[in-house]
Amino acid sequence: MTGTLINTATILLGGTIGLFFGARLPQRARETVVAGLGLFTAAIGIQMFFKSEHAIPVLLSLLIGGLLGEWWRIESRLEHLGAWLEARFTPSDDDGSLFVKGFLTASLLFCVGPMTILGSIQDGLTGDYSLLAIKAVLDGFAALAFASTLGVGVLFSVLVVLTYQGGISLAAAQMQSVMTPEMMNALTAAGGVVLLGLAISSLLEIKPIRSGNLLPALLIAPILVLLFK
């Protein structure tokens, strides 16, 4: 839960700054900071991959997980869910709907994505909250930008972040008794590749990659290590 608490703190901080001073932060400064975070995220992903000594199970998990993710259309379904919720709850531009739009938009951005799931699992399983700390910085800047235009509703998205991310971390913590170090390393390595894809596509915008469709690899990698062993 440590990573989730850090995440909520940065959202509150960024959102508060955005309410009062957000319009004064140049767009170029935001883009440069996000690019720096993208490079750092890519480096973390590579480092995570090298934690596993079993490259073949990790590769197979990414291939099988990618096929399953494309079959289930995970990323597409998440995007459609976000679009449906936004259309459902933001019918006009009055003050009430603006609050809801800020709350909903921020909640979706902060909770839907590979880094949210991967970071929460890693935090719950190993206590390593480094991924959620990176996400926290990103979310803090996003909260600053959103709050400057959508208002105080953005700050209330921390309630969803606490429930969603915290719930995943608590559920992952219950799996510690059945996860061996080799299985955890394989999960971490697969997650590192997903994280690298996320950095390349979303943060650095080098090449579009449907990183969300690789998420099943996080479940498959530990199972393959167990079978290979």
Image: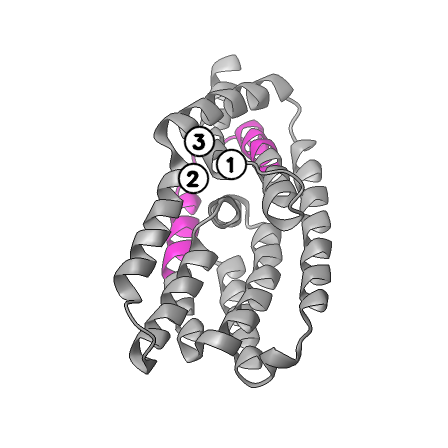
Please tell me whether mark 1 sits on a helix, a strand or a loop. loop
In the rendered view, tell whether residue 188 sits above or below residue 32: above
For the point 55% across and 50% down, which residue is it?
A: 127
Q: Quadrant of residue 68?
A: top left
| Camera-side residue of 195 and 94 | 94
Q: Magenta segment, principal secondary structure?
A: helix
Q: Quadrant of residue 134?
A: bottom right
For the point 66% across and 24% down, which residue is it?
A: 53
Q: Amino acid at mark 1?
A: Arg
The residues bearing labels 2 and 3 have C-alpha atoms spaced at a distance of 12 Å
Disc 1 designates what residue?
Answer: 210
**Residue 162 shows in this picture:** no
Q: Amino acid at mark 2?
A: Glu
Q: Are marks 2 and 1 in contact (CB under 8 Å)?
A: yes
For residue 133: magenta?
no
**Mark sitting earlier along the chain (2/3):** 2
**Mark sitting earlier along the chain (2/1):** 2
Question: Residues in magenta?
Answer: 163-192
Please tell me whether mark 2 sits on a helix, a strand or a loop. helix
Disc 2 designates what residue?
Answer: 75
Disc 3 designates what residue?
Answer: 216
| Camera-side residue of 202 and 1 | 202
Q: Position of residue 181 (x, y in %)?
A: 57, 32
The residues bearing labels 2 and 1 have C-alpha atoms spaced at a distance of 7 Å
In the rendered view, tell whether residue 160 sits above or below residue 14: above
In the rendered view, tell whether residue 112 sits above or below residue 102: above
